């Protein structure tokens, strides 16, 4: 293979199950290996065999710990992957909580499904992976700092840039040596946070890359250009509107960090009497 080959195995024509496979003359790596979430049709993708051989993957580079980016890593290990998983220090810590939790949820859901199926004389199912698979996966994590190159394969190195999305979240810059000329540089954006995050500095990234791989979850939408104070004002307006006269406010939110952001802002608004 003279030229590297990039294949999209998720987060393409959808916004879940992020997984990119990069093939080079020295081996194959994945950037992310996420669980498909959403409709029943999307969730069924998690039960299908991987469209590649897990045992042939030399390494994984993980952008962040959200389950739609990391949630199939234990399945990857279960089916033969044994290489390193490179991630930031905070992502490694969060994965130590989120992947066992994901396994536990699957085990509970399968147990409930099989109980109902038994009453109807239907066949049983098994979880995508178990708590033991999640534990084996965590042993493969290798923590890396931001803005520091790490060697992944011969002729391929990577570094993490703060993405401002979640504790430990990163955009992944990959540099590939070429037979002639400058190295080929690819940036995988992963999820990018907005400006004025409560718990993060603004996102950062390199310039002059050859290719930018960017998920377009909000690609057709302009964000409100608002400071943290202005965003709290908008939140306050929505809460007051929902409460009048005796309404209910339902806020769908990521369980990790986004919920904590909201609770912190609500707590501040209450403390200030707004």
Image: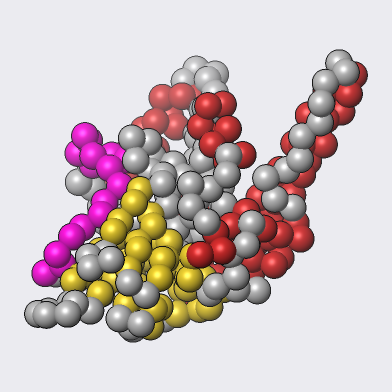
The span shown in magenta is 208-223
Q: Is residue 207 above or below residue 7?
A: below
Q: Position of residue 254 (x, y in %)?
A: 51, 45
Q: Nearer the viewer, residue 166 or 161?
A: 161
Left or right, residue 120 beside residue 41: right
Taking the image as drawn, is residue 263 in sight? no
Taking the image as drawn, is residue 76 in sight? yes
Q: Residue at x 37, y 36 (%)?
A: 14
- 153 magenta-colored: no
Q: How many marks?
A: 0
Q: Residue at x 61, y 39 (%)?
A: 47
Q: Is residue 113 above or below residue 75?
A: above
Q: Residue at x 41, y 44 (%)?
A: 10
The way the protein has been coloured in the rendering is: secondary structure
Could you tell me what secondary structure mostly forms the magenta stretch? loop
Q: Position of residue 156 (x, y in %)?
A: 32, 77
- 214 magenta-colored: yes
Q: Is residue 38 above or below residue 262?
A: above
Q: Residue at x 25, y 54 (%)?
A: 213
The quadrant of the picture occupied by the C terminus is top left
Q: Position of residue 110 (x, y in %)?
A: 77, 36
The quadrant of the picture occupied by the N terminus is bottom left
Outermost residue toward the front?
A: 1
Locate residue 127: give its quadrant: top right
Q: Is residue 265 above or below residue 187?
A: above
Q: Nearer the viewer, residue 270 or 41?
A: 41
Q: Position of residue 225 (x, y in %)?
A: 20, 46
Q: Nearer the viewer, residue 194 or 101?
A: 101
């Amino acid at each position: 293979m003279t030229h590297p080959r990039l294949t999209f195995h998720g987060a393409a024509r959808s916004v879940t199950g992020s997984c990119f496979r990069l093939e080079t003359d020295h081996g194959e790596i994945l950037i992310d290996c996420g669980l498909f979430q959403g409709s029943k049709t999307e969730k069924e993708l998690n039960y299908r065999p991987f469209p590649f051989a897990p045992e042939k993957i030399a390494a994984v580079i993980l952008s962040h710990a959200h389950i739609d980016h990391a949630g199939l890593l234990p399945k990857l290990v279960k089916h033969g992957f044994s290489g390193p998983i490179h991630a930031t220090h905070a992502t490694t810590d969060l994965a130590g909580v989120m992947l066992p939790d994901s396994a536990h949820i699957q085990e509970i859901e399968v147990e409930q499904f099989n109980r109902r199926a038994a009453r109807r004389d239907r066949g049983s199912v098994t979880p995508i992976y178990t708590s033991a698979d999640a534990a084996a996966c965590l042993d493969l994590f290798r923590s890396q700092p931001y803005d520091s190159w790490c060697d992944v394969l011969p002729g391929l190195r990577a570094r993490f840039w703060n993405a401002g999305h979640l504790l430990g979240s990163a955009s992944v810059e990959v540099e590939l040596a070429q037979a002639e000329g400058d190295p080929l540089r690819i940036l995988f954006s992963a999820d990018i946070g907005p400006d004025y995050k409560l718990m993060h500095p603004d996102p950062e990234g390199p310039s002059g890359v050859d290719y930018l791989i960017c998920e377009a979850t909000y690609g057709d939408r302009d964000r409100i250009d608002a400071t943290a104070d202005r965003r709290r004002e908008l939140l306050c307006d929505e809460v007051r509107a929902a409460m009048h006269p005796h309404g209910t406010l339902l806020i769908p939110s990521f369980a990790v960090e986004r919920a904590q952001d909201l609770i912190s802002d609500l707590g501040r608004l209450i403390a200030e009497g707004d």
